[in-house]
């Protein structure tokens, strides 16, 4: 019988590894390290909220942009009227936020830390937590969602996007025209690295599959109710085999979730 996998942990070595990868992306002008454009900043709420999940606006809200460095999310939410805190593991990604904030005199503060260690942030201090794709860079989500719940006020919103498990499990290339499942759903080691540039994996990062139980169950168990779900559309049925649009036609890449913090703490709910 095979030995059970060791419990996954977000070791200092893993964080250092992914921090270096993101530092390099920030310095190299990677597409995920591109500050918001002038036209996006003219209509910031429409840019970030195409789904209308923030329909009443966010004027005066305290917003945490979590694992969201790069000069895009923080400046857009601040331009929409919020007081913004950006948290990220990569100092180079955060530097892009500071540069845009300075140029545009936007109210943004930044903290360099792992997304599952928010000790510098007070309990129930945010009306909204925005969390772009990044759970894949942690080996374990055990501490993440309880920590997000702790800093979100009762009734506050948690809007997040994640790579779907099948996206991370599946090959990037086709083999005789088919994508193949090459990483087990319950394998807690990093997924195979991309061998060539891909919109579906970030260069030199270690990425992990998280089960639906870890993602959706983890959010619910931490004291949130999921109110809305969306799967961003990138599918192109007629795209050439093996391209991004073709793979997204076969395998949905992302899921976007809107969750609301319960009025009472998760501790009380578990009693
Ligand atoms: C996909 S980017 C998100 C923001 C990006 N500018 C965008 O346009 O989508 C993912 C971010 O997660 C950060 N990150 C990776 N691991 C992290 C961790 N353990 N804690 C906090 N941030 C982390 C990276 O430094 C990167 O800035």
Image (cartoon, grey):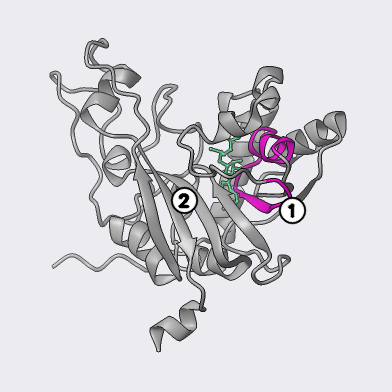
* Percent of width and height locating residue 198: 42, 24
Q: Are marks 1 and 2 in contact (CB under 8 Å)?
A: no
In which quadrant of this rendering is ligand 1 seen? top right
In the picture provided, is 13 more to the left or to the right than 135? right
Query: For the point 79% across and 31% down, which residue is it?
Result: 100
Between marks 1 and 2, how big is the CA–CA gap? 18 Å
Which residue carries the number 2 mark? 135
Q: Is residue 78 magenta?
A: yes
Helix, strand or loop for disc 1 = strand
**Which mark is first along the chain, 2 or 1?**
1
* Percent of width and height locating residue 252: 28, 34
* Percent of width and height locating residue 195: 39, 26
Query: For the point 65% across and 49% down, which residue is it?
Result: 89
| Label 1 crowd bin: few (<14), some (14–19), many (20+), radius 10 Å | some
> In front here: 211 or 77?
77
Which residue carries the number 1 mark? 111
Q: Which residues are magenta?
A: 59-80
> In front here: 154 or 25?
154
* Percent of width and height locating residue 270: 40, 84
In the picture provided, is 109 more to the left or to the right than 210? right
């Amino acid at each position: 019988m095979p030995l059970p996998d060791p419990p996954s942990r977000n070791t200092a070595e893993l964080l250092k590894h992914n921090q270096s990868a993101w530092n390099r992306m920030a310095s190299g002008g990677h597409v995920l390290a591109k500050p918001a454009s002038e036209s996006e900043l003219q209509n910031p709420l429409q840019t970030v909220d195409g789904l209308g999940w923030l329909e009443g606006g966010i004027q005066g809200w305290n917003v945490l942009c979590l694992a969201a460095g790069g000069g895009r999310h923080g400046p857009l939410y601040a331009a929409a009227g919020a007081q913004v805190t950006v948290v990220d593991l990569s100092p180079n990604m955060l530097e892009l936020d500071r540069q845009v904030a300075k140029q545009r005199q936007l109210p943004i503060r930044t903290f360099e830390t792992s997304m599952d260690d928010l000790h510098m942030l007070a309990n129930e201090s945010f009306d909204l937590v925005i969390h772009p794709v990044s759970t894949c860079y942690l080996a374990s989500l055990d501490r993440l969602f309880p920590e997000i719940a702790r800093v979100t006020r009762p009734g506050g919103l948690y809007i997040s996007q994640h790579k779907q498990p099948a996206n991370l499990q599946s090959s990037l290339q086709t083999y005789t025209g088919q994508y193949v499942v090459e990483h087990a759903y319950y394998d807690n080691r990093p997924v195979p690295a991309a061998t060539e540039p891909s919109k579906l994996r970030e260069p030199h990062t270690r990425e992990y599959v998280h089960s639906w139980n870890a993602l959706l169950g983890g959010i619910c168990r931490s004291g949130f109710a999921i109110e809305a779900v969306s799967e961003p559309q990138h599918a192109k049925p007629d795209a050439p085999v093996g391209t991004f649009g073709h793979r997204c036609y076969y395998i949905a890449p992302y899921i976007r979730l809107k969750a609301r913090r319960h009025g009472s703490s998760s501790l009380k709910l578990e009693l």
